[in-house]
Amino acid sequence: MILLLSFGLALSSCGLALATTPTTLLASRFFSGFFAGPILSNCIAYASDMFPDRQRDRAIANFGLSFAIVPLLGVPLGAWLGELFSWRYIFFGITVVVLVLLLVILRLPHVRTGAENERVARQYGQMLDLLRRSEVRVVLWMQFFMQVGFFGFAPNVGVWLSTNYGMTPSGIGFCYMQGGVASIAGNFCARFSTEPWLAAVLHCGRIACVGHGTGDFDS
Amino acid sequence: MKQAALHFWFFQGSLFALLFCSHVQHMILIPLTVEIANSTGFPVEKGGLLIAIGPAPRRFRRFCSPPFRTAGDGGA
């Protein structure tokens, strides 16, 4: 599955790099979401099945760290290179790196978990059974509203900063670097957030920041 | 023992790099939206759609893939 997803990621990156019309751009973007989305969950599943206890924990923690490192390093560097050369080279670069990684992924050892012997319909049934638990439903609703809030705001930040403040891609990338530092600080705080009041404070802080930003946008 | 540790870092490192690439491919669109929109004729004011369209199939695929997640079979 990881191999298939990686190949799809490479193809969709190449499609993004070669896109010349809005239709091809949106189609490539759709497929990049389709293939890139489950990579994290599959990597975590693989690490859970493949590595023993301590190595498994370390691998999963490091996989989570990849998401925090991107705003710190990947976005500023990519934005700067994209501004220096062309945005197309960034996606060509990702294609080449993923194709090289495919050669390594081909060598990943096979792990039998027993899930292969289960019927697919039965596994979906077990997954849907989770929805009967009230705590799962609450978490799903929380995730839903969090995602609505995030994707209503974050995708428009680049356009907002460029059109209102004339910021260059590398300037926006630098803003992201600051966001990455803040996310690491937030993660550090979140280790205490089994306390509901601290989670509520963090979320209120985020909403206040977004509200302040959009207020600035209105003016 | 040393060989096992080497294997661990090798495989873990490659999966980490793969994850890094998948996240960069998504998030790099935020600073580059205006440039991409200008060079492809995509309306700039709808630039947010370029980023927001990704998570839709992402969520759907995440829901579909768990029963097929025999990840380490070196293939699908």
Image (cartoon, coloured by chain):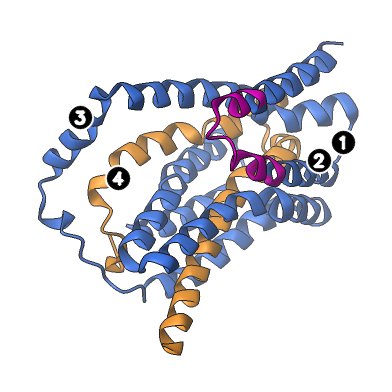
Chain colours: A blue, B orange
Residue A198 painted magenta: yes
Q: Image quadrant of residue B8?
A: bottom left
**Position of residue B15 measured from the top left corner of the image (x, y, whole percent):** 48, 64
Q: Amino acid at mark 1?
A: Met
Residue A154 seen from this side: yes
Tell me which label, 2 or 3, sits earlier in the chain: 3
Chain ID for label 2? A
Mark 3–mark 1 distance (CA, rounded to whole Å): 48 Å
Tell me which label, 2 or 1, sits earlier in the chain: 1
Would you say the residues marked 4 and 3 are in contact, meaning their CB atoms lie under 8 Å apart? no
Would you say the residues marked 2 and 1 are in contact, meaning their CB atoms lie under 8 Å apart? yes
Query: Which of the numbered marks, if any, corresponds to residue A167?
Result: 1
Q: Nearer the viewer, mark 3 or mark 1?
A: 3
SS assignment for the magenta stretch, majority: helix
Q: Nearer the viewer, mark 2 or mark 1?
A: 2
Would you say the residues marked 2 and 4 are in contact, meaning their CB atoms lie under 8 Å apart? no
Q: Amino acid at mark 4?
A: Ser
Mark 2–mark 1 distance (CA, rounded to whole Å): 10 Å
Would you say the residues marked 2 and 3 are in contact, meaning their CB atoms lie under 8 Å apart? no
Q: Are there few (<14), some (14-19), or many (20+) residues within 10 Å of tag 1?
A: some
Query: Which of the numbered marks, if any, corresponds to residue B65?
Result: 4
**Position of residue A217 measured from the top left corner of the image (x, y, whole percent):** 81, 17
Q: Are there few (<14), some (14-19), or many (20+) residues within 10 Å of tag 4?
A: some
Badge 3 is on which residue? A129
Residue A18 seen from this side: no
What segment carries the magenta color? A184-201
Query: Which of the numbered marks, if any, corresponds to residue A175?
Result: 2
Q: Amino acid at mark 2?
A: Cys
**Position of residue A198 measured from the top left corner of the image (x, y, whole percent):** 62, 28
Mark 4–mark 3 distance (CA, rounded to whole Å): 17 Å
Mark 2–mark 3 distance (CA, rounded to whole Å): 42 Å
Chain ID for label 1? A
